[in-house]
Image (cartoon, grey):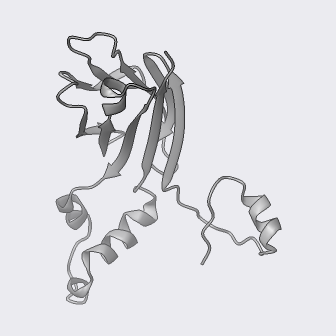
Amino acid sequence: MILLLGDLRKEAFKKSNAVPLPLNAVFVAKKEHVFGKKFFGNKVVFCDNGKIHDLVIECDTSIAKDPCLIIRIDSKIVMQVKRLKWKFRGNQTIVVDGFEVEVYWDVYNWLFSTSFGNAVFMFRTCFSHDKIWDAQPVSDANVLQWSFSQRFSESKFRQGLGFSHVLYAWKNE
């Protein structure tokens, strides 16, 4: 069993004196820091071997009355949070490439901190329990004895569909 973190596969095998095996690695998480004043852009892939998307987060906190958070993927608005002073933490589900992506945000430091702070955004592909069970026909009595996590990990995770993208957005003022 091998756990390989990062994208320097050859260097990792050199340092560990391990023999490279034909691996089908699954991309499970990515963490990045971005800097800006109002716009925070990044490239993101929501699933293994998926399409590369342009992600832009727009938040103008200089509007004291009612700041707003807008998230665009490939220049298309997929999420808008109004009354951000009341909804500075939250989550919402969007659909990208046919996958449900859960978006979590925490912009408390942008709105209420006296020092320069960051906001945290997490984009996580998710599946409803009904979709997972519908994708796995239960025709054998032995299959019923499997736990939900075993069925999930063997069917969906092997396809590389579970992924988290954590974005730390730092304001430059």
Q: Is residue 119 visible?
A: yes
Q: Is 132 on the left or on the right of 4, as rendered?
A: left
In depth, the one of 22 and 115 nearer the eye is 115
What residue lies at 29% left-to-right and 10% top-to-bottom? 63
In depth, the one of 87 and 160 nearer the eye is 87
Q: Position of residue 173 (x, y in %)?
A: 49, 15
In depth, the one of 113 and 149 nearer the eye is 113
Q: Reply above or below: 11 against 54.
A: below
Q: How many marks?
A: 0
Q: Is 168 on the left or on the right of 142, as rendered?
A: right
Q: Reply above or below: 39 against 104.
A: above
What residue lies at 40% left-to-right and 20% top-to-bottom? 75
Q: Outermost residue, front direction?
A: 114
Q: Quadrant of the N terminus?
A: bottom right
What residue lies at 51% left-to-right and 48% top-to-bottom? 30
Q: Reply above or below: 20 against 160.
A: below
Q: Is residue 99 visible?
A: no
Q: Position of residue 109 (x, y in %)?
A: 36, 31
What residue lies at 63% left-to-right and 64% top-to-bottom? 4
Indicate the quadrant where residue 15 lies. bottom right
Q: Position of residue 142 (x, y in %)?
A: 25, 89
Q: Position of residue 62 (x, y in %)?
A: 34, 11
Indicate the quadrant where residue 115 lies. top left
Q: Is 125 on the left or on the right of 65, as rendered?
A: right
In depth, the one of 43 and 97 nearer the eye is 43
